[in-house]
């Protein structure tokens, strides 16, 4: 069963233009993400889906394939689907192009869950424990998980709202990591449907699946990763990389 990792990278990001090419410890961020993805032991191929010839030249220079996609596509997942449309793949991973600290072991964890006997259609990782300050940070996506291990809801807000405090049995949120694994049929379904109301409201593409009743399996990891959303995040991510001994 072939597994392709796709890194969507758009040059004209609203909050941080030219973000994929910003230097992270001396290398363009997209190169950092490719290097982390290539450390996975179970990905068969890594490609970049981009609307920019400039990004394509950078990734091809390090021997990574780049597929040009329509800049009008509404989300990274739509770009991933467009990139692999004519490729042979049983499972597809969407690896966020702005997470240069992504853990290769988390990639392998997602792939293992996709290939498990339960055969879930969508898998994504989350961190059960994180600093309380993150809860109210809209750049950090939180997920509440059902008892069966599937996602109940994702939000940029503080969920569940602690109106009654941390009472026994009060379901905690987890910190969502920007990595998605898809069965091919699930990804094709996603790309055939327009953005949903909740997706547009929160700016979270995974809500398109939940609004239509799909199950999203959550796997847990203790390795925090976060996206570079604004220029101030560059110093934070470089600090995290150094702490983990990544050069």
Image: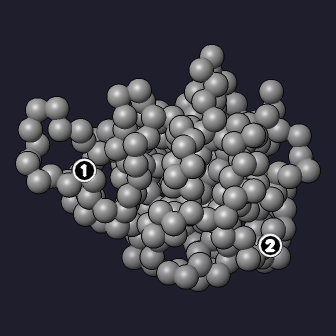
* Gap in angstroms between the C-alphas marked 2 and 1: 37 Å
**Where does the N terminus fall, quadrant-wise?**
top right
Q: Which residue is drawn at 89% across and 40% down?
A: 88
In this rendering, which labeled residue sits more in front, label 2 or label 1?
1
Image quarter for residue 158?
Answer: bottom left
Does 101 sit left or right of 76 as displayed?
left
Q: In this view, does 68 lie above or below 246?
A: below
Question: Residue 178 in the image: x percent, y percent?
Answer: 52, 52
Along the viewing direction, whichever of 243 and 55 lies nearer the viewer: 55
Question: Residue 108 in the image: x percent, y percent?
Answer: 60, 32
Element marked by disc 1: loop
Along the viewing direction, whichever of 130 and 161 lies nearer the viewer: 161
Display coloring: one colour
The tally of labels here is 2
Question: Residue 153 in the image: x percent, y percent?
Answer: 40, 49
For mark 2, does the 10 Å Cα neighbourhood hold few (<14), some (14 to 19), or many (20 or more) residues?
Answer: some
Question: Residue 32 in the image: x percent, y percent?
Answer: 62, 58
Along the viewing direction, whichever of 52 and 181 lies nearer the viewer: 181
Does 99 sit left or right of 202 as displayed?
right
Q: Name the residue under label 2.
A: 70
Q: Is residue 205 at least partly visible in the picture?
A: yes
Element marked by disc 2: loop
Q: Which residue is drawn at 80% across and 72% down?
A: 70
Q: Name the residue under label 1.
A: 160
Q: Is residue 102 at least partly visible in the picture?
A: no
């Amino acid at each position: 069963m072939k597994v392709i990792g796709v890194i969507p990278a758009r040059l004209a990001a609203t909050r941080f233009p030219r973000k994929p090419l910003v230097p992270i410890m001396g290398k363009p961020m997209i190169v950092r993400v490719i290097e982390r993805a290539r450390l996975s032991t179970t990905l068969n191929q890594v490609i970049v889906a981009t609307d920019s010839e400039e990004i394509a030249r950078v990734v091809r220079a390090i021997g990574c394939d780049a597929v040009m996609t329509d800049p009008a596509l509404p989300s990274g997942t739509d770009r991933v689907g467009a990139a692999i449309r004519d490729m042979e793949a049983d499972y597809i991973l969407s690896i966020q192009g702005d997470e240069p600290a992504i853990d290769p072991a988390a990639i392998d964890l997602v792939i293992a869950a996709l290939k498990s006997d339960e055969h879930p259609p969508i898998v994504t990782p989350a961190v059960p424990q994180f600093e309380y300050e993150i809860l109210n940070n809209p750049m950090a996506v939180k997920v509440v998980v059902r008892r069966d291990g599937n996602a109940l809801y994702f939000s940029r807000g503080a969920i569940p709202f602690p109106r009654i405090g941390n009472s026994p049995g009060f379901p905690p949120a987890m910190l969502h990591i920007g990595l998605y694994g898809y069965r091919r049929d699930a990804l094709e379904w996603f790309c055939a449907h327009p953005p949903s109301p909740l997706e547009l409201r929160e700016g979270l593409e995974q809500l398109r699946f939940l609004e239509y009743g799909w199950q999203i399996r959550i796997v847990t990891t203790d390795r925090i990763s976060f996206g570079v959303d604004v220029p101030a995040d560059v110093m934070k991510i470089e600090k995290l990389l150094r702490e983990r001994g990544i050069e």
